[in-house]
Image: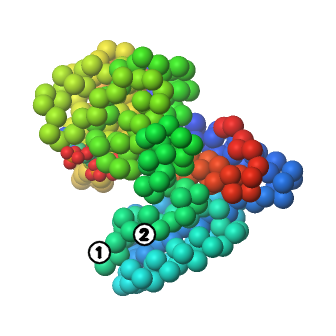
Amino acid sequence: MSGASIIDGKAFAEGLRARVARQVAVLNQKHGLTPGLTVMLVGEDPASQVYVRSKGKQTVEAGMKSDEIRLPADTSHDTVLAKVKALNRNPSVHGILVQLPLPRQVDSTAILNAIEPAKDVDGFHVINAGRLATGQDALVPCTPLGCLLMLKDRLGDLAGAEAVVVGRSNIVGKPMAQLLIKESCTVTVAHSRTRDLPAVCRRADILIAAVGKAEMIKGDWVRPGATVIDVGINRVERDGKARLVGDVDFAGAAKVAGAITPVPGGVGPMTIACLLVNTVTAACRQAGVPVPEV
Ligand code: NDP
């Protein structure tokens, strides 16, 4: 069925985590530095609980310090803010991640912007978004960073490639577009108001789908030989069973694309691996030691 090669995000993420663990061991030995990540979870959202558990486990496996702050769903905005400010002041905390979504009474934008930018390992603070947009050193959102690492591993130099990013959210689409501009791609950002989306997608050497609509992007929207990165995670029911599918019709697109990420097992595992990378970067910058290459 498949003409495309499959980009194995699970294996790539495993390799990346192993490289991070080696760097952490060196930082420990040479500089006495143990990067520390604190994740804050407000409420009992089941998906968030799974993510937070995985983040904690993988942080510890990489040799870093992991802490969790769990607060009840009815915690006030001011209490969450006070916790963030305390973490900002704590020198053993190099990375702070506030798990989204936050309950309605908590102003997410204000909380994300209260995190010290140097500790903002999710890269969502407006200062980090601005630094990325202006080509300065930034902490970059983990999911688009993972997509970029897989693209560079697969394609090498991306300069001059036609890239189409479908989706313009602050956490995926926009930072993805900024990263591709930095790599000298010619970037089109498409969204719900884009006219003739199939034709726009067919221009892409690199097609990134970050929409949140199950299997919306069809095989005949894909340019032959294109590299397709499917960020979408959609829970659907097929033949009475719950399944995860991406934003791309995998079976159709795999017949046409040169390479494609599956869902699950593509972009997903890269997100936490890149969180570990960002935590190491943040710790090194705060300690004034050189940031190791991944
Ligand atoms: P958002 O809902 O914030 O953004 C979706 C974007 O898709 C919007 O820009 C929207 O356009 C656009 N869009 C919606 N419908 C259409 C349409 N019919 N045609 C074209 N564009 C459309 O989602 P996120 O960016 O947060 O997430 C996108 C997907 O990625 C989700 O499935 C999410 O679960 C997944 N995800 C996966 C992660 C991972 O680790 N693998 C991490 C983060 C997200 P407009 O702006 O005009 O409304």
Q: Secondary structure at mark 2?
A: helix
> Which is in the foreground here, disc 1 or disc 2?
2
Task: Mark yes or no: residue 147 visible.
Answer: no
Q: Position of residue 226 (x, y in %)?
A: 36, 20
Q: Is residue 285 left or right of residue 78?
A: right
Which quadrant holds the C terminus? top right
Q: Is residue 175 left or right of residue 10?
A: left
Could you say which is closer to the camera, residue 37 or residue 250?
37
Residue at left offset 58%, top offset 36%: 12
Q: Which residue is mark 1?
A: 104
Which quadrant holds the N terminus? top left
Residue type, numbered disc 2: Ile
Q: Secondary structure at mark 1?
A: loop
Q: Is mark 2 within 8 Å of ligand 1?
A: no
Q: Is residue 61 left or right of residue 51?
A: right
- CA separation, marks 1 and 2? 12 Å
Q: Residue furthest right?
A: 30
Residue at left offset 39%, top offset 68%: 110
Q: Position of residue 95 (x, y in %)?
A: 60, 61
92 versus 253 height, above or below: below
Residue at left offset 44%, top offset 64%: 113
N-terminal label among 1 and 2 = 1
Q: Is mark 1 within 8 Å of ligand 1?
A: no
Q: Position of residue 145 (x, y in %)?
A: 50, 41
Q: Residues within 10 Å of mark 1 (few under 14, many from 20)?
A: few
Residue type, numbered disc 1: Arg
199 versus 150 height, above or below: above
Q: Which residue is mark 2?
A: 111
